[in-house]
Amino acid sequence: MLRTLRIAGFLPLLLIGMTVQAQDKAGPNDNKAPEGFTLLFNGKDLTNWQGAIAFNKRNLMSPEDREKAQKDADEKFLSHWTIADGILYYDGKGGSLATAKDYGDFEMYITWKIEEKGDSGIYLRGQPQVQVWDSDNSTGAKGVDKGSGSGGLWNNPAGSKGKMPTKKADNKPGEWNTFRIIMVGDDVTVYLNGELVVEKAPLANYWEKGKPLPAVGPIELQHHGDKLWFKNVYIKELKKS
């Protein structure tokens, strides 16, 4: 049975390719970018992606050292990110995956799935993170975090806007979920399965606390030792007004 997501206030055209399926196999409308968006994951290979280098170290490297570090990261991590039947699968044993290109302001979609107790996240401009996890059962979910759901800016300071999602909108572990993430300046808005869970909340600079975010940086799929599945990864760069 297929279920179509309804994105609040968004044109039906952008629902193309965002069908949620129960099986680990892309459907005929998956991995096809809507008009105005660029396909970040083509459903066939790791074009547009590379092994992640810690953002706080990457920008301090000389070009030669960075080239070597990138080669090492690719050799160590990429074999753990495989593609079958249009699905990007991570076995939980390598390291994070990063876009080869840096992004500033953007709107993106990404459909993801985790197992029970799974934990991951989407780094924006190299900064952690839009949280992905099974908040009901994850060993890291304690106190107010338990049962809170995905989509919050989990590494922001305690009590800050956006750290916790306003509602739990996750599907069950083992089922597909879709983020719509909008980043303008330092502010992040997150929709999860069509539900607004974070609205224009500043993402904190994790690596240089108290300082403004860098203007650009990679988008990363976080390694946290758990199996992950992704499809339908689209992005649209936004021009500054």
Image (tube, helix red, strand yellow):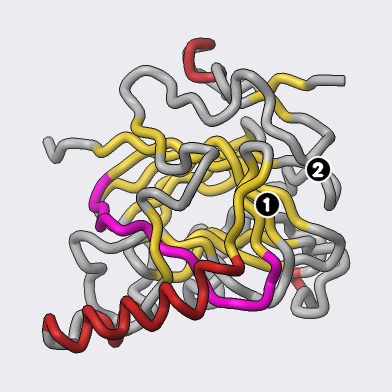
Quadrant including the C terminus: top left
- Judge whether 139 appears above or below 129 on screen: below
- Judge whether 75 appears above or below 236 on screen: below
Residue 19: give x, y in percent of width and height.
67, 24
Quadrant including the N terminus: top right
- Judge whether 18 appears above or below 186 on screen: above
- Badge 2: residue crowd in 10 Å (few <14, some 14–19, many ≥20): some
* Element class at badge 1: strand
Is residue 11 shown in magenta?
no
Residue 124 at least partly seen: yes
Q: Position of 47 compared to 95: left or right?
A: left
Q: Distance between the residues labelled 1 and 2?
A: 10 Å
Q: In which quarter of the image is residue 202?
A: bottom left
Q: Quadrant of residue 175?
A: top right
Q: Quadrant of residue 136?
A: bottom right
Secondary structure mainly formed by the magenta segment: loop
Sequence-earlier tag: 1 or 2: 2
Tell me where the magenta segment starts and ends, as one range. 91-105
- Residue at 26% across / 55% down in the picture? 101
Q: Name the residue under label 2.
A: 175
- Residue at 63% across / 66% down in the picture? 120
User: Which residue type does callout 2 highlight?
Assistant: Glu
The mark found on residue 40 in the picture is none
Residue 112: give x, y in percent of width and height.
65, 47
User: Which residue type does callout 1 highlight?
Assistant: Trp
